[in-house]
């Protein structure tokens, strides 16, 4: 029996503001995600709470950003706050059309001024299988990123069966393109844009992407197509481009 394709998107949403924080864009962001209409969304820099923005902007969402974005479209969502401050917190989120069976936010902070976490959700797919989905936002510093990827691999080796479908997506800040070989060797992952020339796509800045910061890695899926959403209107929403992939399970 042929299973429907799985459509996923990853997007660093810059806390709901345009580049350089010029404009609050969370409502436009919600419309763009609905237009794109993925099944599972991996979001980074999600504002869970910000008391100052709520006072300053009359149309600031009443609840957390991930709940506002998911409303009436993605029935399940998970959020992991990483950076906590007096007036709020932000972190990673996963939105899903399908049931989220379990979620865990794994702290992988290496530098005390740069809090980082890996949001892991187990999602029940329509074919009855469970996909392990991890949303990441890694360090700006190479040594810290290597430690965080090692921690990611060690964590998943403990909690996810080696043959389970796996998706890791997010902002890797991997300027030198070193994540792919490490994740392929440890977890058997393939980067969805690297099938042809071996290089991930350019995703930053969104207006005219030059750097390969954002990634989607998969295991147990065939990549049907992958897209980079950059330029207008995406570049007005965040400084990162959004990435999408259409996937099918092997054997379907």
Image (cartoon, grey):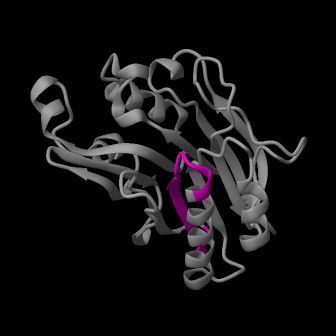
On-image quarter of the C terminus:
bottom right
Left or right: 95 with respect to 153?
A: left
User: Extreme left residue here?
Assistant: 55
Q: Quadrant of residue 221?
A: bottom right
Q: Residue 95's x, y, as percent?
A: 43, 52
Segment colored magenta: 127-143
Name the foreground residue: 138 vs 242: 138
Figure check: 55 above or below 200: above
Name the foreground residue: 39 vs 235: 235
Left or right: 60 with respect to 238?
A: left
Task: Please indicate, yes or no, whether residue 58 appears anywhere in the rendered image.
Answer: no
On-image quarter of the N terminus:
bottom right
| x 82%, y 42%: residue | 199
Name the foreground residue: 91 vs 103: 91
Q: Residue 240's x, y, as percent?
A: 54, 31
Q: Residue 179's x, y, as percent?
A: 71, 55
- 130 drawn magenta: yes
| x 63%, y 72%: residue | 153
Left or right: 118 with respect to 151?
A: left
Q: Residue 122's x, y, as percent?
A: 50, 71
Q: Quadrant of residue 36?
A: top right
| x 67%, y 32%: residue | 211
Q: How many marks?
A: 0
Task: Please indicate, yes or no, whether residue 22 appears anywhere in the rendered image.
Answer: yes
Left or right: 198 with respect to 48?
A: right
- 138 drawn magenta: yes
């Amino acid at each position: 029996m042929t299973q429907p394709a799985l459509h996923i998107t990853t997007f660093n949403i810059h806390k709901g503001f345009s580049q350089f924080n010029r404009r609050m864009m969370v409502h436009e962001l919600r419309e763009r995600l609905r237009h794109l209409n993925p099944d599972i969304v991996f979001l980074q820099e999600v504002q869970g709470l910000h008391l100052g923005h709520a006072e300053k902007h009359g149309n600031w969402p009443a609840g957390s950003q991930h709940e506002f974005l998911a409303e009436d479209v993605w029935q399940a969502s998970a959020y992991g706050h990483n950076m906590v401050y007096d007036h709020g917190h932000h972190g990673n989120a996963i939105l899903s059309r399908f049931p989220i069976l379990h979620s865990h936010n794994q702290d992988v902070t290496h530098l005390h001024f740069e809090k980082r976490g890996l949001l892991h959700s187990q999602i029940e797919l329509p074919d009855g299988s469970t996909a392990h989905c991890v949303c990441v936002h890694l360090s700006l510093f190479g040594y810290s990123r290597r430690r965080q990827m090692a921690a990611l691999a060690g964590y998943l080796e403990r909690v996810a069966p080696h043959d389970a479908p796996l998706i890791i997506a997010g902002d890797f800040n991997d300027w030198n393109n070193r994540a792919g070989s490490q994740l392929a060797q440890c977890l058997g992952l393939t980067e969805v844009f690297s099938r042809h020339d071996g290089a991930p796509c350019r995703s930053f800045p969104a207006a005219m992407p030059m750097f390969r910061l954002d990634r989607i890695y998969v295991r147990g899926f065939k990549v049907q197509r992958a897209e980079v959403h950059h330029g207008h209107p995406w570049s007005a929403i965040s400084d990162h481009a959004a990435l999408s992939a259409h996937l099918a399970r092997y054997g379907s």
